[in-house]
Image (cartoon, helix red, strand yellow):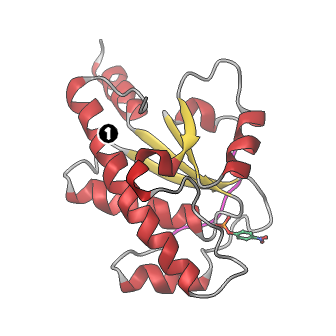
Amino acid sequence: MERTQEANRRARDASVLFVCLGNICRSPTAEAVFRERAARAGLAQRIVVDSAGTGDWHVGRPPDRRAIAHAAKRGYDLTPLRARQVAPGDFDRFRWILAMDEANLRDLQALRPRAHHGHLGLFLDFAPSLGVREVPDPYYGGLDGFERVLDLVEEASERLLEHVGRGLRTGDARAPS
Ligand code: 4NP
């Protein structure tokens, strides 16, 4: 295989898109946390990470200031991120499309092209030990909701990174069974 083709194939195998409703609280937090964990594992060059929202209300805006502040306390920088809406082309670009909650997942399933062969599922399913499957929406709640998002996202990012990293080493990137 030609070199750029090989590089593209590898990048696609390790491309992760986190999706929530507004793309200003949960999914940008997941994007920043997972990118940081991937970088610490020496995989920054091998994993493409992005986030998007199913809704379009906040397109072009930075993350919610509460999400920025709470993430900063744990060393994650959300300030360069800008909200965007999920687009049909995302199903071609991303091997792993991970929803924060069941409503996000249903919206993504409705958009999913028949030809999509990547993984579409709930992010927290990579961390069954958490005992919950959804990252609760913190937008209308108190500040403890943002800490809860970070706790869930940090744990699930570690588990997802183990899974994706193993796939990169072995060429096997199947979803959890
Ligand atoms: P997110 O949170 O989906 O985690 O970004 C929300 C942000 C905005 C709204 C809802 C949820 N909103 O209704 O504007």
The count of marks equals 1
Q: Can residue 79 be seen in this view?
A: no
Residue 40 position, x and y percent, is: 21, 59
- Read off the magenta span: 81-86
Q: Which image quarter: residue 173?
A: top left
Residue 23 position, x and y percent, is: 64, 63
Q: Which image quarter: residue 100?
A: bottom right
Classify 90 as above or below 24.
above
User: Image point 63% across, 70% down: which residue?
Assistant: 24
Residue 55 position, x and y percent, is: 77, 57
Q: Is residue 30 magenta?
A: no
Name the residue that disc number 1 marks: 163
User: Image point 51% across, 70% down: which residue?
Assistant: 149
Label 1: element kind = helix
Image quadrant holding the C terminus, namely top left
Task: Give the main secondary structure of the magenta stretch.
Answer: loop
